[in-house]
Amino acid sequence: MYLSKITIENFRCFGDGLNRFELTLRRGLTALVGENDAGKSAVIDALRLVLGTTDQEWYRLEDSDFHEGASTKEIRIGCRFAALSPDDKRAFLEYLTYDERNGHEPVLYLNWSATDAGETARGRPYRRVEIHSGKNGDGPSIDPKVRELLRATYLRPLRDAQQALSAGRSSRLSQVLHHTDEIKTSGIGYDRNKFLEVKDLGTLNVLGIGDLADRLLEDQQGVRGTLKRINDHLERLSLQGDIVKGNIKVGGSRASEDIRLRQLLEKLDLAFDGGGQRAGKPGLGTNNLLFMSCELLLLSQENEGNKLLLIEEPEAHLHPQRQLRVMRWLQSQAQEKGIQIIVTTHSPNLASAIELDNIVMIHEGRAFSMAEKETKLDPSDYRFLARFLNVTKANLFFARGVMIVEGDAENILLPTIAKILGRDFTEHGVSIVNVGGVGLRRYARIFLRKNEKEDGYLEIPVACVTDMDVMPDCAPAIIGKMKEDAGWPKKDNKRRWRAKRDIGDESALTTFRREKRAKACGQWVDTFVSDEWTLEYDLALGPKDPNGGFSGGLAEDVFVAACLAEKDDSINAQKTTVGDVQKMAAQEFSALTKETNKAKNGDAKEVLASHVYAKFAKNSGVSKAIAAQYLAEKLLEKHESGKLTSDELRASLPKYLVAAIDFVTGNGEEEVSPCEDAPVNH
């Protein structure tokens, strides 16, 4: 059996009615991801309330557990268990409901409720708690003995694994061992009337070892001698016919076998046994690995009932490489041993190792599964993301806004621009994901819901920033794609570049841009296509003015940054300095400006911006990423020195960049024309 669905009403961040929480679960492992306070821990605690946990820890309801503003002071939690085995059906026979939609297959419903009527008992708030079976809670109340079969194993966040694995009364290790079949079935008991040779000691079971130890302790020479002296004293104190005599026995040796076995197992520690560099006391991470191994061993041996493991933050105390191993191991154990595992995590490292089908985003009190048929991802998208969704890109699961870019230059430059504009990505919880020119829209489709009427929108703004890749008509000759005096080259499959005249008039360009945008646009996802050509060219060109020309722009800054990138090796080798390169670049740019003002073909600003971009296009040794780093440093330096205000930078930037930054940081002042199926107010 496995937990196939949970519904939660009026518990903490979850409301009721249309605002209640619903989560459909799959077999195997499910990872709950999302930002802080989204409701991940509330889901785990709700399951602890309904099912109880194997460590017998009691969860006490607090006033804060009742949803603020709820219409009633009643928490309702429902669980549905499906795929019951024959043993499960026998164990829960009188509580089963037969699902008509699934061939009358029996399922188990649990309906847990807690009502706060304002009553007190012994000075404490009294809340009436009930748990019933039946789809609508109209079945028999669940017997406490039956509930024992439903208990889940729970590993709390920042758990003290060392204490759980140490010897002591009711230690977690003793509980695990006590439920292990091998402990009870391997070996034989100890017969006091039979002589036992040393070679036979290995055949004893745990109780036999305990009985032998008791016998040896009781018969030890010093113990027997002391007992004899005690009885000598007692003999002098006895009355005629009423002899008082003592006997020394090991405490608990006359208890039942089950109690004696528990007492023996409580003497055991599970400790790390490492040599070499790993010798000595283990750290918190290693103890956590031991703890998880122990719990999974116990669950894998269960033959009936609920094999559910709840782990909050499995990454606790583990370094990144170990986190990846742990997550892959948990997924394999879930598949091979038939264990259901629900984990919560804040680790992009862990998320990158989890199959996308097994990830559920919790956002603003709602669950959004990333499984196939739940998103607008194609089957090929899932195969692609399984290969390329690494730890850097997996941070999109924990963001309040996501900026997806195609290159290192955007990845380096946009956070600095946003900071200067007063829209700092870190402060606004925005993750920037660099896909390296591969699969931009595949990542965006993670956030598009296929059943949007049922699921609603995943209201996390996602901006895809991409180049239009259509150059001005003057650019091919400037960047060396064609000779200036030659005729316009024939458009065929061999020519990979496009210019405006290949597309058509302004109306055709608008249609081209709209079609490119529509590839990933809808709900809370939007694509921002560069106004003209590429990032560097558009930065140099500046935004269009109302008269159709171009105003502002960062042409000189981009040109100087390109020159610095070209001389980066020399700068690092201390053969030249940043100041010398900047001085030389400024002189070269001044001369270039004078020359382009005489241009006959094309707008002078387009010609100048094309010459700036030629620094990258004609010289493979000029890194766009290194140039972006120099440009980011220069812009930040000018801003901090008062030479560049936020408003001045905003006025100099291409509009698509400003719109994308405003979109992911939640600024509704800039008008962003939504896609046909996207909400009007992003």
Image (cartoon, rainbow, N blue to C red):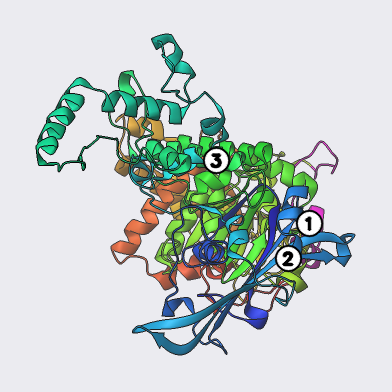
**Where does the image place residue 459, in percent across and percent down from the top left?**
62, 70
The amino acid marked with disc number 2 is Tyr
- Side (left or right) of 283 relative to 416: left
Q: Residue at x 56, y 71 (%)?
A: 364
- Side (left or right) of 555 relative to 141: left
The amino acid marked with disc number 1 is Lys
Of circles 3 and 1, the one toward us is: 3
The amino acid marked with disc number 3 is Leu
- Which stretch did the figure color magenta? 487-513
Dot 1 alpha-carbon crowd within 10 angstroms: few under 14, some 14 to 19, many 20 or more: some
User: Mark 2 = which residue?
Assistant: 95
Q: Earlier in the sequence, mark 2 or mark 1?
A: 2
- Side (left or right) of 661 relative to 136: left
**Where does the image place residue 662, in percent across and percent down from the top left?**
53, 70
Q: Nearer the viewer, residue 128 or 633?
A: 128
Dot 2 alpha-carbon crowd within 10 angstroms: few under 14, some 14 to 19, many 20 or more: many
Can residue 476 be seen here? The reply is: yes
Tell me if residue 350 comes above or below residue 43 in the rendering: above
Alpha carbon separation for disc pair 3 and 2: 26 Å
Q: Earlier in the sequence, mark 3 or mark 1?
A: 3
Tell me if residue 202 comes above or below residue 231 in the rendering: above
Which structural element holds mark 2?
Answer: helix
Looking at the image, do the residues carrying marks 2 and 1 touch, with CB atoms under 8 Å apart? no
Q: Nearer the viewer, residue 426 or 586?
A: 426
Label at residue 298? 3
Q: Looking at the figure, which quarter contains the C terminus?
A: bottom right
Query: For residue 114, which quarter of the picture?
Result: bottom right
Looking at the image, do the residues carrying marks 3 and 1 touch, with CB atoms under 8 Å apart? no
Alpha carbon separation for disc pair 2 and 1: 32 Å
Q: Nearer the viewer, residue 273 or 38?
A: 273
The question of residue 507 being in magenta is answered with yes
User: Mark 1 = which residue?
Assistant: 373
